[in-house]
Image: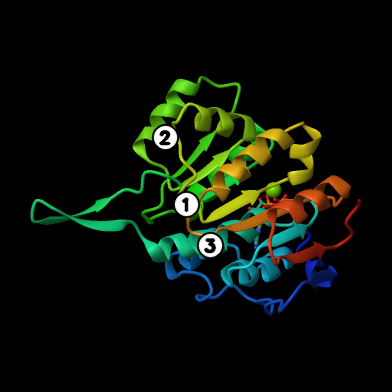
Amino acid sequence: SGINFDHYDDIPVEASGENVPEPITEFTAPPLDDLLFENVQLARFTKPTPVQKYSIPIIAAGRDLMACAQTGSGKTGGFLFPVLSESFKNGPSPVTNNGGYSYQRKAYPTAVIMAPTRELATQIYDEAKKFCYRSWVRPCVVYGGSPIGNQMRQMDQGCDLLVATPGRLNDLLERGKISLSNVKYLVLDEADRMLDMGFEPQIRHIVEDCDMTPVGERQTLMFSATFPDDIQHLARDFLSDYIFLSVGRVGS
Ligand code: ADP
Ligand code: MG
């Protein structure tokens, strides 16, 4: 697996939907935030991968997305870069405090990323930490099979971008330790694997919780290596006016 940097410009990409934004050919600010762009350069990401070329402008344009691409094609940056760019721009809410100027940390996440396993959630979290360098955004990760007490205390301290396995996120929701009322971005990474692992009820519960958000401006982004019937069904249920992106050969 991994990216073959010699041939990735030849990988066929299909994008369908209404008014598909033009793909980017280079990392530039805009559409990336200046600080995020600097962090991308620090990470020595010199060129966007095929999925990133399309997903970055699509997400930056405010669209929902269903993207199918194989493992190692750069999907993490494909959603993290536009999501973090928007978060960096917005910044924390400034408040006046005792005549001085301070920042009030947002208590609840504006971005939630679901992943099937502890290992995958941790990988996304590590990537998020790297690209949040010198920003105000605080990423957190929660997963099952680990004591919930520490994770509850982390949630009490506030979290801007939350990476979570569906079971543990549901648990924290049921305990009232987290609210999804601020969520602007909901990402389902490795959606096919999450369904294979039996997470559909938890995922549906989480999406329903997000649906209670009064602001109707949430973006939902789904990523999957394959596109079988049950994933097509979820996409129809969760996404609105979405763009379908398929990179390389995608199995069903
Ligand atoms: P996927 O989620 O599609 O399996 P990842 O996002 O984990 O793929 O990316 C695979 C590897 O490629 C990671 O090590 C990541 O850091 C690296 N990578 C991703 N995008 C780029 C890029 N534009 N330039 C260089 N390396 C990249
Ligand atoms: Mg991935």
Sequence-first tag of 1 and 2:
1
Residue 52: x and y, percent? 67, 65
Q: Which mark is residue 155?
A: 2
Q: Amino acid at mark 2?
A: Met
Q: Amino acid at mark 1?
A: Thr
Sequence-first tag of 3 and 2:
2
Considering only vertical position in the picture, is 197 above or below 4?
A: above
Residue 94: x and y, percent? 25, 58
Q: Which mark is residue 110?
A: 1
Q: Residue at x 49, y 22 (%)?
A: 148
Q: Residue at x 44, y 70 (%)?
A: 34
Under tag 3, what secondary structure?
A: loop
Please rate how many residues cluster around mark 3, counting C-alpha atoms within 10 Å: few if below 14, some from 14 to 19, many from 20: few
Considering only vertical position in the picture, is 101 above or below 170?
A: below
Nearest to viewer (mark 3 / mark 1): 3
Sequence-first tag of 3 and 1:
1
Is residue 185 toward the left or the right of residue 51 in the image? left
The residue beneath circle 3 is 217
Farthest-out residue, left: 99
Q: Nearer the viewer, residue 157 or 18?
A: 18
Residue 178: x and y, percent? 45, 36
Q: Quadrant of residue 168?
A: top right
Q: Amino acid at mark 3?
A: Glu
Under tag 1, what secondary structure?
A: loop
Look at the image and tell me whether residue 72 can be seen.
no
Q: Residue at x 35, y 36 (%)?
A: 157
